[in-house]
Amino acid sequence: MSYVNTKTRTMLVLVVTLLMVIAYHEGEAIVCSQVNMFLAPCLPYLKAGGAPSPQCCGGLNSLKAAAPGKPDKQVACQCLKSAANTIPGINDDNAKQLPAKCGVDLGVPFTKTVDCNRYAIAISFC
């Protein structure tokens, strides 16, 4: 079994994220597996805090870009809420702070209790 160093792992995450963005075609609905893939690099931050990695912030930006319309925003919001409630160890305060720490305006808090219907009506990203 070969050793995969941090740089190789980082490049792999970036390539997978890039491929997902390229594969996304306008008119196709976003699904939770895409949302989860975009945010997978954020799990260490969501659990332990500190500073989110560049890969995490890149995934957050990719998620925002992949959900341009209201239906996509509602789905993405529900996926984020579901992830916050089902992945063990996610700290709700870390989740709330993630968009600001990455400089990405999602327009809605990433929390376990967000009302996605309330925020999806707004123009901003859910």
Image (spheres, grey):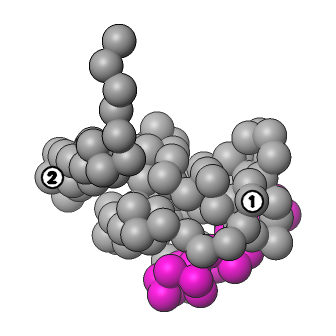
- Looking at the picture, tell me which residue is in the foreground, 104 or 66: 104
Instruction: Point out residue 99 in the picture as x, y percentages from the top left corner.
Output: 57, 79
> Can residue 124 be seen in this snapshot?
no
x 43%, y 44%: residue: 37
Left or right: residue 67 versus residue 45 is: left
**At label 2, which amino acid type do we have?**
Ile
Looking at the rendering, the stretch of residues picked out in magenta corresponds to 96-114
**Alpha carbon separation for disc pair 1 and 2:** 31 Å
Residue 79: which numbered mark, if any? none
x 60%, y 74%: residue: 51
Q: On the image, numbered disc 1 is attached to which residue?
A: 48
Label 1 sits on a secondary structure element that is: helix
- Is residue 109 magenta-colored? yes
Q: Quadrant of the N terminus?
A: top left
Total marks shown come to: 2
> Can residue 43 be seen in this snapshot?
yes
Label 2 sits on a secondary structure element that is: helix
Q: Quadrant of the C terminus?
A: bottom right
- Looking at the picture, tell me which residue is in the foreground, 50 or 99: 50
In terms of secondary structure, what is the magenta stretch mainly?
Answer: loop
- Is residue 103 magenta-colored? yes
